Image (cartoon, rainbow, N blue to C red):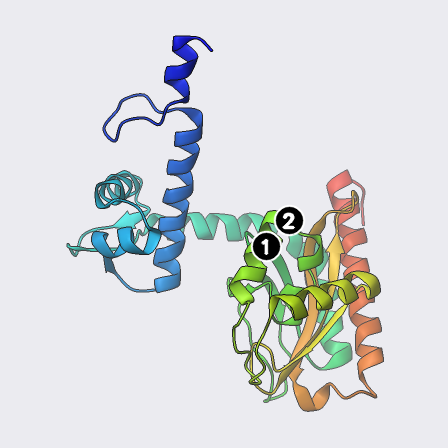
Amino acid sequence: MTALNARTRERPEADGDQVTWAAGTQLLARAVSLILYLRERDQPVTVSELAGALQIPVNTAYRLVRTLELGGLVDRSHRPYVSLGLRLMDLGLAKQRQVTRELAAVAQPVLEALTADTGETSLLLMPTGARAICILAVEPSRAIRLSYQPGHVLPLYAGASGKVMLPWVSEQLLETALAQGDGLILAGGKRLTAGALKADLKTIRACGHCVTHDELDAGASAVAAPVFTRSGQIFASVSVAGPTNGFTEERQPALIARVVAAASEIARGLSKSWSGETA
């Protein structure tokens, strides 16, 4: 190995001007983790608290915060506290417009028909990292219903809408979701284990749908099916959710069949849209 190669592989000094590719990737990962931590914490924190939570040196946390502040991604107007920056609102709205433009024309009518047929809330979720996010939602007109608004973030390890996508995500995201859920107490009081979740995923992969009761909300149930791209990659999930008393064993097969059909219809519509064909 030459002296030049040896130098470029070294970890850079804390205040060095040159940053190797690997170190740059690490800094980016830390910046992303910082933003996500602020979102999960959902309240302002100090830089020292950020450093402790992310297990990084305080001076590194300060540099990350200053850089993100320049881009409007974090806010320090109430020093010594740090919170999410307002620019994230703009980014979120821009992404929402893009997703709605690409998906609503195909998926919205399918979800509306699904809610009309089942009387339950219909949802379209997409995976985002080791979580899932609600993209579209159609609620029934009845008074008692389950309500999820677009932008609502759900886990992949619990609840049919997220869990049904988990067997097809990358190995790294799968391991992250398993770690997030292992040992948690679900809404119905049952303790989630990584082993039980892995068994559920085998069943989901084999049957192509997921049914859950009392996992995210007590007294709530859901039926979900995956939506795949033409190449077989997981893209989204379609689900119906509502009070558990409406998800009886007698009714469940019909709900499963209807949700699976809706997922297939959306997949076909998106495939035509992406290929430039008319619906």
> Residue sitting at 37 percent across and 43 percent down?
31
Q: Name the residue under label 1.
A: 175
At label 1, counting other C-alpha atoms closer than 10 Å, the crowd grade (few under 14, some 14-19, many 20 or more) is few
- Whether tag 2 and tag 1 are in contact, CB under 8 A, the answer is yes
Task: Classify mark 1: helix, strand or loop.
Answer: helix
At label 2, counting other C-alpha atoms closer than 10 Å, the crowd grade (few under 14, some 14-19, many 20 or more) is few
> Residue sitting at 62 percent across and 72 percent down?
159
Q: Establish if 263 lies above or below 128.
A: below
Within the image, what quadrant is residue 240 found in?
A: bottom right
Q: Establish if 45 lies above or below 221.
A: above
Q: Establish if 7 lies above or below 58.
A: above
Please give left or right for residue 228 compared with residue 23 in the image. Answer: right
Residue 21 in percent (x, y) is at 44, 26
> Residue sitting at 39 percent across and 31 percent down?
23
> Residue sitting at 39 percent across and 62 percent down?
40
Amino acid type indicated by mark 1: Glu
Label 2 to label 1: alpha-carbon separation: 6 Å
Name the outermost residue toward the left: 79
Q: Mark 2 points at which residue?
A: 171
Q: Could you tell me if residue 133 is visible in this image?
A: no
Task: Classify mark 2: helix, strand or loop.
Answer: helix
Within the image, what quadrant is residue 261 found in?
A: bottom right
Residue 122 in percent (x, y) is at 67, 72
Q: Which of 155 and 10 is in front in this view?
A: 10
Within the image, what quadrant is residue 193 found in?
A: bottom right
Amino acid type indicated by mark 2: Glu
